[in-house]
Image (cartoon, rainbow, N blue to C red):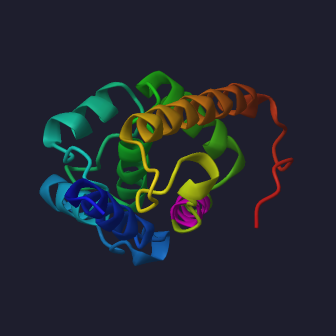
């Protein structure tokens, strides 16, 4: 196995071990922006995303994707929103995320919506099986270009499916969504 394949497998193993925090894992007191940013970046560090910055937080508030802090203090709702936003913005524009948030929060509490998202995201990571969609990096026949094309295609397909579902979510009557 090449160094690149070893590195990829190590990264994949690391992200599959990630478990997003649940609502009750968040501090039960208000925090300042610097603390919010540090927590979000710490929770999402294994994914190696661009770090969250104060400018990003201000942009989310400005575009009404999340509500303003109260006296410069952030609550659990903010922490949940920033974690979710950071993940969703890798494939969705802010206006679609805002629409999805609004639709979800019409049906569920912020806690229920976040816990459901965190559980689903964690489950998807932990059950990720690249053998179903791409050649595993440690097989003899691994081809980088094929793996890149297949994962890109899968990302696009799931993004289109998610977009379609999100567009129809506001039409669902309150209480019509079944959650575990």
**Considering depth in this image, is 118 or 133 the residue closer to the camera?**
133
Tell me if residue 81 is in the magenta stretch. Answer: no
Q: Nearer the viewer, residue 26 or 84?
A: 84
Give the position of the N terminus as an image quadrant: bottom left
Judge whether residue 110 can be spotted in this image: no
Seen in the picture, residue 140 relative to 154 is either above or below; the reply is below
Report x, y in % for residue 34: 13, 56
- Asked if the magenta segment contains residue 120, the reply would be yes
Residue at horizontal 39 percent and vertical 34 percent from the top:
145
Specify whether 58 is left or right of 142: left
The location of residue 140, given as percent across then percent down, is 44, 58
Tell me how many marks there are: 0
Q: Quadrant of residue 102?
A: top right
Q: Is residue 72 visible?
A: yes
Relative to 24, residue 34 above or below: above
Measuring from the top left, give residue 126's x and y in whole percent.
53, 68
Look at the picture and state if 153 lies above or below 48: above
What residue span does the magenta drawing correspond to?
Answer: 115-125
**Could you say where residue 83 lies in the image, as x and y percent from the top left?**
37, 53
Is 27 on the left or on the right of 116, as rendered? left
Residue at left offset 58%, top offset 57%: 131
Q: Residue drawn 23% across and 36% down?
A: 56
Quarter of the image where the C terminus is located? bottom right
The residue lying furthest to the front in this view is 140
* Residue found 68% across the figure and 25% down from its top: 167
């Amino acid at each position: 196995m090449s160094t690149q394949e070893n590195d990829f497998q190590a990264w994949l193993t690391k992200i599959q071990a990630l478990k997003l925090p649940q609502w009750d894992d968040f501090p039960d007191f208000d925090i300042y922006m610097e603390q919010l940013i540090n927590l979000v970046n710490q929770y999402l560090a294994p994914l190696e995303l661009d770090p969250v910055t104060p400018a990003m937080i201000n942009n989310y508030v400005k575009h009404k994707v999340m509500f303003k802090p109260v006296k410069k203090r952030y609550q659990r709702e903010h922490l949940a929103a920033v974690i979710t936003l950071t993940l969703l913005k890798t494939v969705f524009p802010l206006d679609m995320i805002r629409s999805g948030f609004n639709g979800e929060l019409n049906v569920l509490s912020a806690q229920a919506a976040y816990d459901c998202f965190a559980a689903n995201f964690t489950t998807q990571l932990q059950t990720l099986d690249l053998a179903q969609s791409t050649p595993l990096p440690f097989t003899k026949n691994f081809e980088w270009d094929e793996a890149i094309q297949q994962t890109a295609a899968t990302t696009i397909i799931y993004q289109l499916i998610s977009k379609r579902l999100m567009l129809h979510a506001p039409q669902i009557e309150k209480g019509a969504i079944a959650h575990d």
